[in-house]
Amino acid sequence: MKRRVCLLGATGSIGESTLDVIARHPDRFEVAALAAHRSVDKLAAACARFRPAHAALLDAAAADALRARLRAEGIATQVHAGAAGLATVAALPEADTVLAAIVGAAGLAPTLAAARAGKRILLANKEALVIGGSLFMQAVREGGATLLPVDSEHNAIFQCLPPGYAGPHSAGVRRILLTASGGPFRSRRPEELADVTPDEACAHPNWSMGRKISVDSATMMNKGLEVIEAHWLFGAPSDAIEVVLHPQSVVHSLVEYADGSVLAQLGHPDMRTPIAQALAHPDRIDAGVARLDLAALAALSFERPDGARFPCLALAYRALEAGGTAPAVLNAANEVAVAAFLAGGARFTDIAAACAEALERVAAERADSLATALAADARSRAVARAFLDTRAAAPRRGLAGAH
Ligand code: NDP
Ligand code: MG
């Protein structure tokens, strides 16, 4: 039977890679629904190509424009709008699989709806797990959903874990090793980082991705969020998750066993591999990715991350260890600071400073409901905005080496 896929974040980088894989296997997959924020042109083109029964845009005016466009083109896709529209398509009875690829906290509500509806969730939207944590995992359990990681590191770990795995120290697993490329600033002197531009930060050496995650990779907050993501996905405490720099991005992550064996998953840095693995699991399908030529690669190297250049990594460990709403606070401050940096309203180094300030100023509470997590998210955004406003108002000189 064909898998019927709802794709949240259909117009983004992961969304486009997913549609590329799906288009290669019309015998296996069918697009049931496509959703995004407000990219009318891209969503209309995807609806014309894949003919889903449903589409959704968060922005109501954009949803009206999409509806008019599809009607004019004779495409019978039903268009939903707003947060309710996204939740509707995420829980559609006629879809069995939901690929969650909205960027940021905005993805949490629809992905939770998919979990409660018992879907097979292919998760790229790591921020949902960072904010939602225990609530999200509880919704997966109670809804009878299945959670498969799409993030390349977590997908690699998933592939290297043994059957019967139930957390480190079960099934002989000792540790999880997450690889990180180090991004475009791996070798930059820390004192140069205050003046880097958004385009430099988004020029990732190995991966082509959306702008927010590209900046996260440059600060290594992405790896910090992935440590928290690994904690929830694999039930691992922070001291069983280690980050290692691997500039070539060929080894996507590793699992260390009690007997000293270390299993790794390798491949080209192309998200179509983990997407195809998760879409077809337990089968294997062609993802359109070139074969790995080890001899041509010649060398793979590994280093320890530099804490001075990448303070965001330590902040993420700190948030994970503090627990409760602390990861939601970290994520929210990061989203605000990255958006400000991309808009030219903050320096690259302000991102880590804003996150540290939010963790300091917003006390962690028990994350016992979605309302608590979202309240912490809102408080953190306010603290980060106020902090960045103060920085922007301060004279530039003297800021460069402030942290
Ligand atoms: P992009 O910025 O390329 O795409 C984001 C997608 O989310 C777009 O479809 C956008 O729609 C949609 N979107 C944004 N805000 C909202 C909102 N408020 N409501 C509904 N939809 C929204 O991001 P990526 O594809 O790079 O990343 C997506 C997620 O996957 C992130 O969480 C990222 O961390 C994760 N990820 C990405 C990887 C990559 O290689 N790109 C690798 C591993 C994980 P619109 O076009 O209308 O704005
Ligand atoms: Mg990743």
Image (cartoon, rainbow, N blue to C red):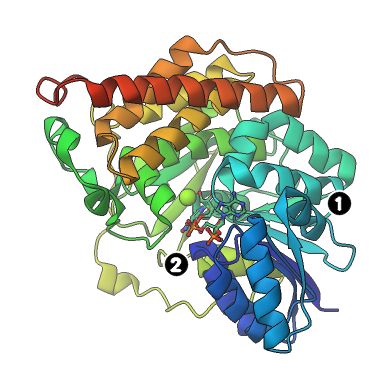
Specify the amino acid type for callout 1. Gly
* Residue lying furthest left: 397
Q: Is disc 2 placed on a helix, strand or loop?
A: loop
Q: What residue is drawn where x is 61% and y is 77%? A: 44
Above-or-below relation of 308 to 87: above
Do the residues under discs 1 and 2 have CB atoms within 8 angstroms?
A: no
Q: Residues within 10 Å of mark 1 (few under 14, many from 20)?
A: many
Q: Nearer the viewer, mark 1 or mark 2?
A: 1
Where is mark 2, residue-wise?
Answer: 270
The image shows residue 69 at horizontal and vertical percentages of 65, 79
Instruction: Tell me, yes or no, if residue 366 can be seen here.
Output: yes
Q: Residues within 10 Å of mark 2 (few under 14, many from 20)?
A: many
Q: Quadrant of residue 10?
A: bottom right
Query: Viewer-proximal residue, 281 or 390?
Result: 390
Q: Which mark is residue 118?
A: 1
Q: What residue is drawn where x is 54% and y is 18%? A: 321
Q: Is disc 1 placed on a helix, strand or loop?
A: loop
Q: Ligand 1: does it lie within 8 Å of the C-beta at label 2? A: no
Instruction: Tell me, yes or no, if residue 320 can be seen here.
Output: no
Q: Ligand 1: does it lie within 8 Å of the C-beta at label 1? A: no
Among the two numbered marks 1 and 2 on one chain, the one whose residue lies closer to the N terminus: 1
Specify the amino acid type for callout 2. Asp
The image shows residue 325 at horizontal and vertical percentages of 62, 21
Quarter the C terminus occupies: top left
Q: What residue is drawn where x is 53% and y is 71%? A: 16
